[in-house]
Amino acid sequence: MRLGMHVSVAGGVDLAVERGVALKCQAIQIFNKNNNQWKAFTITDEVVARYKANLKACDIHPVISHASYLINLATSDQALWEKSRDSFREELERCDRLGIRHLVVHPGSHMGAGKEVGIARVAQALNEIYAANKIKCVTTIEHTAGQGNHIGYKFEHLAGIRKGMHNKNKFAVCLDTCHLVAAGYDFRTPEKYEAMMEAFDKIVGLRTLQAVHFNDSKTPLGSRVDRHDHIGKGTVGRGGFRSFLTDPRLAELPGILETPTDGTGKDERRDLAALKRIANSSGSRK
């Protein structure tokens, strides 16, 4: 896998590439819009040109983007749903402008209306977006921990969204190691990993998996609580990480760290080094 981390776009998306290079990333993830605001910062043509020049000058690929945390495509609140749909469309268009192929998004909360309603609402929003706009970027649904009324913590939810989409080529999945454990998926031995991936392939389709988030979990298996921890400090276990890292079916996919950071780069370097040690250790998936 191509390992890297989520990097800041402070000062411009072009600077995110420079930060990724400094941290020795092979791939990076960015926000292309304010992650906790509806209003988007301006991306000028000059910034886009510098961003693409910086990428061309290094070996970072791919770049993926993560959508704003405010977006809730699963909501039963019509006003919020429309605002979320329009905001997500804007983010997809910004990804196209930057040449980013995948935009990761949490499907959201059904707010008490039920999982089936939430799944249908996500598919409806994506159908409307792609029908009305020529967008290349692929919506990449992140598997979730399952807190509260949030959908996406079961593979069946992901399959339901895909089934409801008219253009299934615009659907992909991002798995998160912390979320998987919190949602009750145990992949911490090679045998359990293979069983989980077999189930994912049968229910959703392995070809849809286009990104992995590498985070340890502060909470135990099945907690349904999303709390990221540093690699090796939580309940995922080395075996769980190793199975993802050494799976030849996932070669060339981006493996992105979203572990806690103090903003200095020290935490990111330590966690990236930990992943590399696990990938290169003598243990085997088989």
Image (cartoon, rainbow, N blue to C red):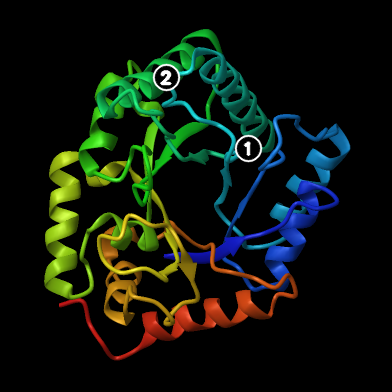
Q: Which residue is mark 2?
A: 76
Q: Residue 278, relative to residue 125: is it above or below?
A: below
Q: How far separated are the C-alphas under marks 1 and 2?
A: 32 Å
- Tag 2: amino acid: Ser
**Residue 281 as seen in the image, left or right of residue 34:** left
Q: Position of residue 26 (x, y in %)?
A: 57, 65
> Which residue extends farthest top?
132
Closer to the chain start, of discs 1 and 2, is 2
Front disc: 1 or 2: 2
**How many marks are shown on the rendered structure?**
2
- Tag 1: amino acid: Gly
Q: Position of residue 2 (x, y in %)?
A: 48, 64
Label 1 crowd (10 A; few <14 / some 14-19 / many >=20): some
Q: Is the N terminus in the top left, top right, bottom left or bottom right quadrant?
A: bottom left
Q: Is the C terminus in the top left, top right, bottom left or bottom right quadrant?
A: bottom left
Front-lying residue, 79 or 38: 79
Q: Residue 40, relative to residue 271: is it above or below?
A: above
**Residue 198 as seen in the image, left or right of residue 265:** left
Q: Quadrant of residue 180?
A: bottom left
What label does residue 99 carry, if any? 1
Tell me the element at label 2: loop
Front-lying residue, 282 or 66: 66
Tell me the element at label 1: loop
> Which residue extends farthest bottom?
282
Q: Residue at x 40, y 24 (%)?
A: 122
Q: Position of residue 91 (x, y in %)?
A: 63, 30
Q: Quadrant of residue 195?
A: bottom left
Label 2 crowd (10 A; few <14 / some 14-19 / many >=20): some
Q: Residue at x 17, y 58 (%)?
A: 196
Front-lying residue, 103 or 151: 151
Q: Residue at x 13, y 54 (%)?
A: 198
Q: Residue 245, relative to residue 201: is it above or below?
A: below
